[in-house]
Amino acid sequence: MGDPNLQIKSEWVTDFAGEELQSNIGDMIDTMRHYRGVGLAAPQIGIAKRIIVLEVANNPRYPQADAIALSVLINPQISDFSEQTETAWEGCLSLPGLRGKVSRARSVAYQAVNENGERKQAIVQGFLARIIQHEIDHLDGILYPQRLDDLKQFGFEDSLPDFQL
Ligand code: ZN
């Protein structure tokens, strides 16, 4: 948090054929798994490109979350946000040890391109919708503390009286 690289708008991916894209995606998946994230955006590892990865599998940082298969979303865009919102605790690998309660759309419709260059679109809800909104925010230079409604619900995991997984 505070790093200017996390405050800029990332570039759209235009080269789907080169090795660089696959190498970036591989680095992102390795980093997400190593630090036990449920999602990662390219700018978090210093790559200013519109790529996100996500996966939930027995994650101790989110023990209640249902499993979500590994997914790579290139140039993801949300076309529709539900009016209904949900508030929940979020964390971020770029803000280690911190959590904050953030309100997000309960469901979103998105489009993206996958690692094979294929277009995909879906309507998702709940935790997956939250991860996608959080990660796309990274591509626009936004970190979750900028979305907090109440700064009292932001702090260190060990110190927040109301924080629970
Ligand atoms: Zn994050």
Image (cartoon, grey):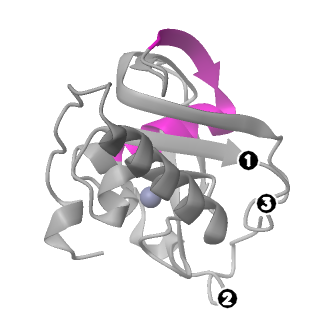
Q: Nearer the viewer, mark 2 or mark 3?
A: 3
Q: Which residue is mark 3?
A: 59
Q: Pinpoint residue 126: horizontal percent, then vertical percent.
A: 67, 32
Q: Secondary structure at mark 1?
A: strand
Q: Which residue is mark 1?
A: 56
Determine if the C-beta at disc 1 is less than 8 A from ligand 1.
Answer: no
Residue 153 appearing in the image = yes
* Quadrant of the displayed image that contains ligand 1: bottom left
Amino acid type, residue under disc 1 in the picture: Val
Amino acid type, residue under disc 3 in the picture: Asn
**Residue appearing at x 40%, y 56% in the figure:** 149
Structural distance between the alpha carbons of marks 1 and 2: 23 Å
* Contact? badges 1 and 2 (CB < 8 Å): no
Residue 146 appearing in the image = no
Q: Pinpoint residue 10: horizontal percent, then vertical percent.
A: 19, 44
**Magenta range:** 118-137
